[in-house]
Amino acid sequence: MSNILVLVELSTAGNISRSAGELLSLASTLGTPVAVLATPHVAPGIVTELGSLGAQHVFLGQTETEPMLLLTPQVEALWQAVQKFRPSAVLASSTIDGREAAARLVARTEGVLLANAVAVRFDGERIVATNSVFGGSYSVESTAEGGLPIITVQSGVLEGRAPEVAAHVTVHHLTLNPEGSGVVEGSTAVVASSRPDLRTAGKVVSGGRGMGSKENFALVEELADVLDAAVGASRAAVDAGYVAQSSQVGQTGVSVTPELYIALGISGAIQHRAGMQTAKTIVAINSDEDAPIFDVADFGIVGDVFAVVPQLISAIRSRSQGSS
């Protein structure tokens, strides 16, 4: 079987991102999954964990602690893995870092970028990526001609899990060139939060302009907390100053595919729906029965969010206390 490289992203604490499991599962349907990561320190058990996610090989790019050049270690590790494994394709998550690393690898390998795929398959010897376009109204397919396919994949759209294996490990010391990196030093600001990360959360509660004010938006956060969900927002709510831009869901914000998406006071403009309509279950609460959000909702409640949501929160708390 052909080798399929998977870029494994790590958190600031050195933990494997949720996207790694999804990408390795996809890679297992295409060929032999090869996990690629770059780090100065290998967390105990990380190779075993990658094997449990389906990685048959782990290519570990060993870096120096200083300086940590922004994404240069990841790109160099991918480049070295391409030389060693001669893959049929490279997969990365469609995150900020994943897109950046993929683009830089395309330039180095003279490959072909297939961006923001929701599905990937082989058609004979050609690899084909499926994309959702025009706010999810259409699906299109694209393929790579004459170069290594380097594919970024939307997080949360893939299901299934690759069989657990005992991974073989290759450790390669990376020689990095600071002059070849656009940014030679970087730091990550870690925002402490007890809520799940919006991009990978299994449940998301979002609020829109209908919340009326920043103070009223606290109702969105309260419902999110009782559900152990992430907090999202429409662009209108962000532009009105109800919540930070990092919470924006939509075409110009974050794309999410949670198991449950609850939209409070969101009309459902096509730009917002483009970022959330792939959620498994969508619940909408809005006072306007003609709001476009109801077109994509699995369950809709026409009513005042300030009357409905407090009752919902109370019911969830009562049920939680009853089962404890």
Image (cartoon, rainbow, N blue to C red):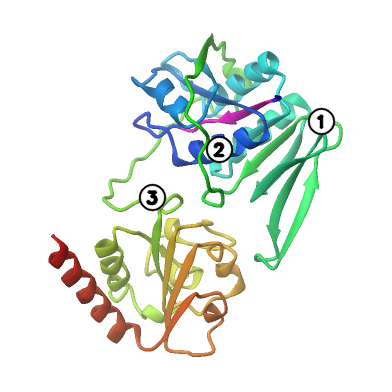
Camera-side residue of 308 and 212:
308
Residue 278 circle label: none
Q: Amino acid at mark 2?
A: Ser
Dot in front, 3 or 2:
2
* Residue at the spot 28% in from the left edge and 70% down from the top edge: 218
- Give the residue pinned by disc 2: 25
Q: Which residue is mark 1?
A: 147
Tell me the distance, in whole angstroms, between the alpha carbons under discs 3 and 2. Answer: 21 Å
The verdict on residue 254 being magenta is no
Q: Secondary structure at mark 1?
A: loop
- Residue 132's place in the image compared with 313, above or below, is above
Picture coordinates of residue 288 (x, y %)? 47, 89
Q: Earlier in the sequence, mark 1 or mark 3?
A: 1
Query: Which residue is at 53% across, 58% downward?
Result: 253
Q: Earlier in the sequence, mark 2 or mark 1?
A: 2
Q: Is residue 230 above or below residue 77?
A: below
What mark, if any, has residue 197 been given in the picture? 3
Give the residue type that dot 1 points to. Gly
